Amino acid sequence: MVLHAMFPKLSRCFSYTASRDWLYRQSFSVAGLRSVATNLGDGTTMSCWVPKINHPSKPTLVLIHGFGANAMWQYGDHLHHFITHYNVYVPDLIFFGESFTSRPERTETFQAQCLRKLMEAHGVHRMSLVGTSYGGFVGYSMAAQFPEAVDRLVLCCAGVCFEENDMKDGHFAVSNLDEAFSILLPQTPDKLRELVKLTHWRPTMDVPSFFLADFIHVMCSTHVEEKKELIEAILKARQLSNLPKITQPTLIVWGEHDLIFPLELGYRLKRYIGESAEIAVIKNAGHGVILEEPKEFARHLKSFLIDTQSTSLSPQLTLREKIQKIFDIRSIWGALALCCGGIILAELLGTPLLPLMVIMLCYLCARFLFIYV
């Protein structure tokens, strides 16, 4: 009870969300990535996590995030599956993270063009893409616009085949754009709770409002109007007949109980792409399948991206990489190692343990409570 009463006061001077973000940054750095901002010209800058050392013998994999928290939060728990097989790039799309533009374009076509320029700036001309939700719209557009640049494509819960009439016909949890804005860009704890209920099939524990308010302040308070324009651009006047065809091998991953983009859109996309596409439906999961069923999600991605190319993608883990994998600060063992190391250091320095224990508890709460995609 004492600690529970302390949390709201502590949150005024200590951000749980910012602390977790810092931990993700450290884990990405330990995994061999560094954050780089690239000026694309015309008032456009994109930030991206890129390999510290690019291995020419490895192919390239680009992980494209959706709405919600930044790219680190959405792919942080999956990075280790691919880092030994690929040169992995994790960009922040325009108006997410540190990426921005002064140009007026808001379509996924423009996002894909910026992503292509970003990759060319880093000397990458061919790659495989993984796009979740909004990131899938961008990935599909890039595969359509630049087929020579995209080898394989994974689309996770990406309603690319959505038509504007689907919303009017009541096939979605929202009935108009204003309602979509209020939920997908939550500005109050209640709206964030509503979003979590829509994106997750299994019920989640009730999260205190001060945690949610802190998350909104750190992750959802910038470029709100521009993000509304991004949502409007993918939903308004959308027609399947205007969607270009793609021919790359494509894996479609969908949560069985997705309420944001219903499963029927996944089957519709499979039919539209044709024989080059396959679909994997993950049971007991909603739109947030990447977080609800991370092992199953990773299994399908590894099967499609790694196992099918096992002769060329089979590097052995080095001793350093094995140690990093075991003590990843996002894992249970990593959290325990971090706590034990902090306690030992506090004892050696003669520092009181209570503040450290409170900070560790805040981290663990943030680790399991902020399940927002």
Image: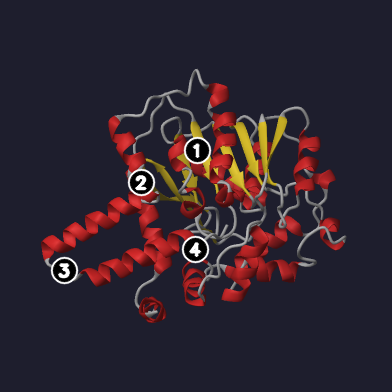
The C terminus lies in which quarter of the figure? bottom right
Find the distance from the CA under tag 2 to the CA under tag 1: 31 Å
Q: Which is nearer the N-term, disc 3 or disc 4?
A: 3
Q: How crowded is mark 2: few (under 14 residues within 10 Å), some or many (20 or more)?
A: many
Disc 4: which residue: 369
Q: In this view, does 79 lie above or below 234?
A: above
Q: Nearer the viewer, residue 98 or 79?
A: 79
- What residue would you read off at disc 3? 351
Q: Sequence-wise, which precedes: disc 2 or disc 1? A: 1
**Number of numbered markers:** 4
Q: What residue type is labelled 4?
A: Leu
Kindly give the residue lying farthest to the top in the view shown.
Answer: 311
Name the residue at 53% across, 54% down. Answer: 42
Residue toward you, 161 or 81: 81
Q: Is residue 60 above or below residue 139?
A: above
Residue on which the image places disc 2? 328
Give the mark toward the camera: 3 or 1.
3
Label 1: few (<14), some (14–19) or many (≥20) C-alpha neighbours in 10 Å: few
Query: Dot 1 corresponds to which residue?
Result: 120
Quadrant of image for the N terminus: bottom left
Element type where label 3 sits in the image: loop
For the residue labelled by badge 1, is the local secondary structure a helix, a strand or a loop? helix
Q: Which of marks 2 and 4 is nearer the N terminus?
A: 2
- The image quarter in which residue 173 lies: bottom right
Contact check, label 2 and label 4, Cβ < 8 Å: no
